[in-house]
Image (tube, helix red, strand yellow):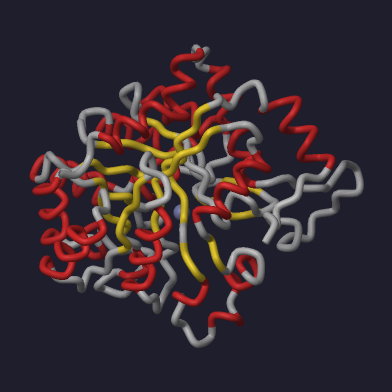
Amino acid sequence: MDAPVELREIDRRIWERELDDFVPKKVFDAHSHIYRWEFNLDPKKNEGGLARLVVPWYEQASFALLEQTDAVLMPGREVHRLSFPFPFAPLCDFDASNSYLAEQIACDSSSAGLMLVHPGMTAEDINRQLDRFHFLGFKPYRFYSANADAVHCSITDFMPEHQIEIAHDRGLIIMMHLSKPDGVADPDNLKDLQHLCRRYPNVRWILAHCARSYSTWAIERAAPVLRELPNLWYDTSSVCETDAIATLLKSVPSGRVMYGSDDLPVGVLRGKYISFGFGWAYLGPENHRLNLDHCNAEMTFTRYEQLRAMKRAADLLQMGESEIRDLFYNTAHELVTGSGC
Ligand SMILES: [Zn+2]
């Protein structure tokens, strides 16, 4: 099957005029999803909003489809990946998700996988799968929280300490999409990160989506705490605002921020994340009633909006070529090659 993603005139214009000279030739995508729609066990899945994004083109998000997508969106780039399953909620086939990931990721020795975990999994379950599949860490998700509150849960509600202890013992990565309305600025999240980083110093945490800071304020508030913690990394996946990315880059120690696409399917969607007040939301062609008669109202890929924001952040901070190569490749490559045992 050909890659379903196709470039339109607007995309070509943005890629050629703004992005082609910014994205380095070698890319390590630190945040990508490999899955099959059939692993979503929710009997009502085809009535939900996710089905509109996934069916039919992204029902089978294989490593090959990620390759095809990157070849269209970022032509001529060599791309390796840190990938994990899509965390279908509320019901997901964890075993099938993880074994499919392992099978897919095996085709590229420079790429690696993170195991989708549920807080109910025992240490024995997890160790067995780690031994079998050689995953480099875990992808927990707030919708699996033991207290059934995906909005207000604490880190250990969906990433319990018996699992963090395994990550510590084995030197693994934890891909953390923080919960709570204030995200990384929430004092309890910060307290938990301080406590967990000190107690389990061998864990390498990646705080996804600029520590879930789609605009500036949360990362600004959290920065004094975050910059003191040695085992934190960050990915820029799906963050589309320049000032959020620039603030992250200047607030945390250098060499800790990594490009991530959030594909599939977020990066290929047309639209972008926008922020306002203390909130943020996804704006796409079909979910608004704005009058856009005065301008070209077409939307490009979320990934292109994110790359535009990354480019402008890099310009603002006067980043050199080697720092940009770190952002797109070296930091993630070193994290992946230095993790696990
Ligand atoms: Zn994601």
Say which residue appears at 45% left-offset and 39% top-offset: 80
Q: Position of residue 184 (x, y in %)?
A: 34, 45
Give the left or right position of residue 290, taking residue 116 as reference: right
Residue 22 is drawn in which quadrant? Answer: top right
Q: Position of residue 263 (x, y in %)?
A: 54, 51
Give the left or right position of residue 309, taking residue 43 as reference: right
Farthest right residue?
A: 293
Could you tell me which quadrant the C terminus lies in?
A: top left
Say which residue appears at 51% left-offset and 49% top-offset: 262
Q: Position of residue 91 (x, y in %)?
A: 40, 79
Say which residue appears at 51% left-offset and 59% top-offset: 62
Exactly how many numbered labels are in the figure? 0
Q: Nearer the viewer, residue 118 or 244?
A: 118
Q: Nearer the viewer, residue 94 or 320?
A: 94
Could you tell me which quadrant the N terminus lies in?
A: bottom right
Residue 288 is drawn in which quadrant? Answer: bottom right
Say which residue appears at 32% left-offset and 48% top-offset: 186
Rendered view: 121 above or below 237: below
Rendered view: 249 above or below 59: above
Residue 251 is drawn in which quadrant? Answer: top left
